[in-house]
Image (tube, grey):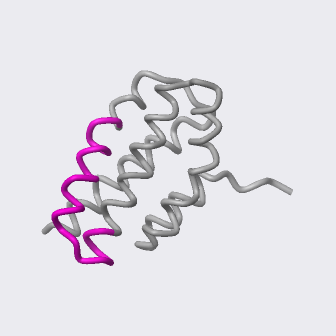
Amino acid sequence: MTKTLAIDLFIQAIQKNEFVQAHELLEDDWKLYKKKEMKKHAKALQGLINGATALALLHIKKRPHAYVKVWKVFEKYKILLDEIELENMDRFILAKQILEQKNKTLNS
Protein backbone atom coordinates (compact mmCIF):
# COMPACT_ATOMS: atom_id res chain seq x y z
CA MET A 1 0.00 0.00 0.00
CA THR A 2 1.38 3.41 -0.95
CA LYS A 3 1.30 6.28 1.47
CA THR A 4 -0.33 9.41 0.13
CA LEU A 5 2.10 12.31 0.39
CA ALA A 6 1.17 15.57 2.08
CA ILE A 7 1.98 17.44 -1.13
CA ASP A 8 -0.46 15.24 -3.08
CA LEU A 9 -3.20 15.90 -0.52
CA PHE A 10 -2.35 19.61 -0.74
CA ILE A 11 -2.71 19.51 -4.55
CA GLN A 12 -6.03 17.68 -4.32
CA ALA A 13 -7.36 20.20 -1.80
CA ILE A 14 -6.41 23.27 -3.84
CA GLN A 15 -7.83 21.69 -6.99
CA LYS A 16 -11.15 21.40 -5.13
CA ASN A 17 -10.90 24.99 -3.78
CA GLU A 18 -10.47 23.60 -0.26
CA PHE A 19 -7.91 26.25 0.59
CA VAL A 20 -8.36 26.23 4.37
CA GLN A 21 -7.80 22.47 4.50
CA ALA A 22 -4.85 22.74 2.11
CA HIS A 23 -3.18 25.22 4.43
CA GLU A 24 -2.97 22.57 7.17
CA LEU A 25 -1.57 19.78 5.02
CA LEU A 26 2.01 21.04 4.67
CA GLU A 27 2.31 22.38 8.23
CA ASP A 28 4.09 19.32 9.66
CA ASP A 29 6.69 19.28 6.87
CA TRP A 30 7.19 23.04 7.24
CA LYS A 31 7.74 22.67 11.00
CA LEU A 32 10.19 19.81 10.42
CA TYR A 33 12.29 21.91 8.02
CA LYS A 34 12.25 24.79 10.51
CA LYS A 35 13.38 22.47 13.30
CA LYS A 36 16.21 21.14 11.12
CA GLU A 37 17.16 24.75 10.31
CA MET A 38 16.64 24.15 6.60
CA LYS A 39 15.54 27.76 6.04
CA LYS A 40 15.05 27.72 2.28
CA HIS A 41 13.03 24.51 2.43
CA ALA A 42 10.87 25.88 5.24
CA LYS A 43 10.31 29.19 3.42
CA ALA A 44 9.44 27.39 0.16
CA LEU A 45 6.74 25.41 1.96
CA GLN A 46 5.64 28.54 3.81
CA GLY A 47 5.11 30.13 0.41
CA LEU A 48 2.82 27.31 -0.73
CA ILE A 49 0.95 27.39 2.58
CA ASN A 50 0.50 31.15 2.27
CA GLY A 51 -0.68 30.76 -1.31
CA ALA A 52 -3.50 28.52 -0.12
CA THR A 53 -4.22 30.85 2.80
CA ALA A 54 -4.39 33.88 0.51
CA LEU A 55 -6.87 32.14 -1.78
CA ALA A 56 -8.98 31.20 1.26
CA LEU A 57 -8.98 34.85 2.33
CA LEU A 58 -10.11 35.93 -1.13
CA HIS A 59 -12.49 33.15 -2.17
CA ILE A 60 -14.00 32.01 1.13
CA LYS A 61 -13.56 34.77 3.68
CA LYS A 62 -14.02 37.66 1.21
CA ARG A 63 -11.13 39.65 2.71
CA PRO A 64 -9.34 41.10 -0.33
CA HIS A 65 -6.96 43.34 1.66
CA ALA A 66 -5.73 40.40 3.73
CA TYR A 67 -5.45 38.31 0.55
CA VAL A 68 -3.09 40.88 -1.02
CA LYS A 69 -0.75 40.82 2.00
CA VAL A 70 -0.61 37.03 2.23
CA TRP A 71 -0.32 36.46 -1.53
CA LYS A 72 2.83 38.61 -1.47
CA VAL A 73 4.42 36.01 0.83
CA PHE A 74 3.65 33.30 -1.73
CA GLU A 75 5.18 35.45 -4.46
CA LYS A 76 8.25 36.13 -2.35
CA TYR A 77 9.00 32.51 -1.45
CA LYS A 78 7.85 30.56 -4.51
CA ILE A 79 11.18 31.26 -6.23
CA LEU A 80 12.91 29.18 -3.56
CA LEU A 81 11.46 26.09 -5.24
CA ASP A 82 14.03 26.75 -7.97
CA GLU A 83 16.87 26.80 -5.43
CA ILE A 84 16.22 23.72 -3.32
CA GLU A 85 15.87 20.00 -3.84
CA LEU A 86 12.94 18.07 -2.46
CA GLU A 87 11.83 14.52 -2.94
CA ASN A 88 8.93 14.57 -5.44
CA MET A 89 10.01 18.05 -6.55
CA ASP A 90 7.69 17.91 -9.56
CA ARG A 91 4.70 17.77 -7.18
CA PHE A 92 5.79 20.95 -5.40
CA ILE A 93 6.23 22.73 -8.73
CA LEU A 94 2.78 21.52 -9.78
CA ALA A 95 1.30 22.85 -6.54
CA LYS A 96 2.87 26.26 -7.23
CA GLN A 97 1.47 26.27 -10.77
CA ILE A 98 -2.02 25.29 -9.61
CA LEU A 99 -1.98 28.07 -7.00
CA GLU A 100 -0.98 30.58 -9.67
CA GLN A 101 -3.74 29.36 -12.01
CA LYS A 102 -6.36 29.42 -9.23
CA ASN A 103 -5.26 32.95 -8.39
CA LYS A 104 -5.77 34.05 -12.01
CA THR A 105 -9.16 32.35 -12.19
CA LEU A 106 -10.42 33.78 -8.88
CA ASN A 107 -9.22 37.27 -9.78
CA SER A 108 -10.74 37.42 -13.25
- What residue span does the magenta drawing correspond to? 57-77
Q: Residue at x 17, y 68 (%)?
A: 64
Q: How many marks?
A: 0
Residue pictured at 63% horizontal, 53% vertical = 6
In percent of the image, x 28 and y 57: which residue is there? Answer: 101
Q: Residue at the spot x=35%, y=48% of the render?
A: 97
- The x, y position of residue 39, in whole percent, is 49, 26
Locate residue 48, reporting x and y percent.
Answer: 42, 48
x, y percentage for residue 11? 50, 58
2 to 35, vertically: above or below: below
In this rendering, the answer to whether 19 lies above or below 61 is above
The x, y position of residue 43, in whole percent, is 44, 34
Q: Quadrant of the N terminus?
A: bottom right
- Image quadrant containing the C terminus: bottom left
Q: Is residue 108 left or right of residue 84?
A: left
Could you say which quadrant of the image residue 16 lies in? bottom left
**Among all residues in the image, which is located at the extreme left?**
108
Magenta segment: does it hold 108?
no
Task: Work out whether 1 lies above or below 15.
Answer: above
In this view, the residue in front, 33 or 78, is: 33
Between 5 and 59, the one lying in front of the other is 59
- Establish if 102 lies above or below 77: below
Q: Is residue 66 left or right of residue 3?
A: left
Main SS of the magenta part reads: helix
64 falls in the magenta region: yes
Residue farthest to the right? 1
